[in-house]
Amino acid sequence: MSINRKPIVVGNWKMNLSLSEATGLAYELSEQLEDIAGVDIDVGIAPSTPFLSIIAAICDESAIGISAQHMSAHLSGAHTGESSVQQLLDVGCQYVILGHSERRHVYGESDEQIAQCARLAHDLGLIPILCVGETLQQREANQTLDVVLKQVSSAFSQLTADEASRSICAYEPVWAIGTGHTASPEQAQEVHAAIRKHLSELYSVAIADSVRLQYGGSVKPENAEGLMSQPDIDGALVGGASLKVNSFNSIVQITSKLISQT
Ligand code: PGA
């Protein structure tokens, strides 16, 4: 983690939690993270779409940011089941997760769609969290960097340098998501360093140095320190461990402590 980049930890709640569980978790997190969220570290949570507005209202007084998990590649119109970027802004979102592996692999989202969403998100002022990552098969075939860097090129393809520097990119190896198998700190750092180098070629070293790169894939309190202390890892996108107040809180605390020691 670098002192120049403010770390960011985002909890991706996916399609979990009842309304009362989600509101309870949001209240507890707002209380427990009151002193550090937004100060040493940016913290976000990504509830399911129907709960965005109510969770945003609960977190309104805190510095916890609200993220959508998905958005439409269109501005408005006949797109049943989708949410537009303006609608997400209207209910209090600051971030949107784009190209999560579940969206790519289960719902067939293409690189082009993700690039289009990133463009629209910046047009209206939502910060995209651009997810990239290889499957186990691709890793075993030695294609990790080819796959990941191609996804990065595409996700950033319609963004100016300034927009790129305000975007967040999350490296999430597909084989590590929800499986309990985490990339080792060295494996994660290798890919993060390659992403940053690639961004320096697409834009400039200064822009690449300002983009925050999160790691995601079975992050938990037990492995957070090793991962978050890597020089090119600036935070985490947390799935399962973000559903419990204690585990998410401790990942945030560990990440924030590491930066204050840098
Ligand atoms: P996980 O999910 O932490 O449960 O592996 C991460 C993610 O999908 O963003």
Image (cartoon, helix red, strand yellow):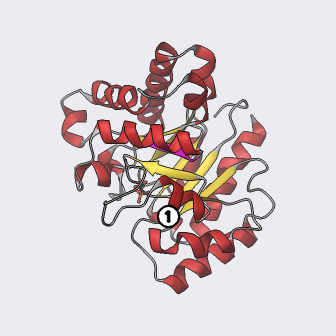
Is 200 on the left or on the right of 70, as rendered? right
Of all residues, the one furthest to the front in this rendering is: 77
Q: From what the image shows, is residue 207 above or below residue 8?
A: above
Residue beneath the point at 47% across and 30% down: 192
Ligand 1 shown in quarter: bottom left
Residue 135: quadrant of the picture: top left
Q: Position of residue 39 (x, y in %)?
A: 79, 50
Q: Is residue 224 visible?
A: yes
Number of numbered discs present? 1
Helix, strand or loop status at disc 1: helix
Q: Which residues are magenta?
A: 126-130
Q: Position of residue 197 (x, y in %)?
A: 48, 18
Which quadrant: the C terminus?
Answer: top right
Which quadrant: the N terminus?
Answer: top right
Residue 233: quadrant of the picture: top right
Of all residues, the one furthest to the bottom in this rendering is: 20
Return the residue at label 1: 241
Residue beneath the point at 61% across and 23% down: 209
Does the segment drawn in magenta span residue 9? no
Q: From what the image shows, is residue 20 above or below residue 169?
A: below
Mark 1 beta carbon near ligand 1 (under 8 Å): yes
| 182 or 31: nearer the viewer | 31
Q: From what the image shows, is residue 174 above or below residue 251?
A: above
Residue 212: quadrant of the picture: top right
Q: Position of residue 261 (x, y in %)?
A: 77, 39
